[in-house]
Amino acid sequence: FVLYERRGADQDVQFSGVVATVENPTVFIRYDWAAAGVDMAIATYGRMSRRLIDWLACGSMRDAQVIHYGDYDPVGLSEFCRLEGALAGRATLFIPNQIERLFSLYSDRDLLSRSASMLPALQQNQHVGVQRVLRLMAEYGGALEHEALLIAARTK
């Protein structure tokens, strides 16, 4: 996602509705956003730029509700925490109903070990969703790629 306007002009862009920030390009392209009730999806390709977060947090976006769709790993949770900290209650972490089943089937030890150094800071966060995902990572010994959402959608 890139804002091409002159510096500061992005503050004038207004949107009200549900906005999804999407870490994974495959999920961005293949997920059924309309069925999920999302009005606008923004591909972040991993870490969100400060400029994107500032735009989502600005006054012209106050009527937008932001849902973070990221990997269920320390990096994805950290990105959600950045977003939540800036949006003062307008950001939520998407956690599918079947997340425990997905962790039991598809958790990845290597995905967790690559970013395990981020765990101590995340463990200090009091967000219920963050703590739930951290418990699942500990229970299953791995993290979960966001693409599991696509698998879950196919098996409904």
Image: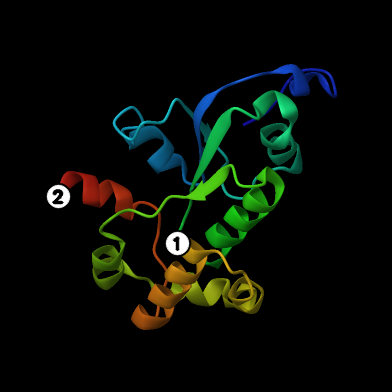
How much space separates mark 1 and mark 2, taking CA atoms?
20 Å
Residue that appears at 46% across and 40% down: 25
> Compared to 96, does 15 lie above or below?
above
Mark 1: secondary structure: loop
Residue pictured at 59% horizontal, 42% vertical: 90
Kind of residue indicated by mark 2: Thr
x and y, in percent, of residue 100 in the image? 28, 67
Looking at marks 1 and 2 on the same chain, the residue that comes earlier in the sequence is marked by: 1
Asked which quadrant contains residue 31, the reply is top left
| Along the line of sight, the residue nearer the viewer: 77 or 25 | 77
Q: On the image, numbered disc 1 is attached to which residue?
A: 72
Residue 58 located left or right of residue 65 = right
Residue 102, image quadrant: bottom left
Identify the element where label 2 is drawn. loop
In front of the other: 50 or 39: 39
Instruction: Determine which residue is flagged by label 2.
Output: 155
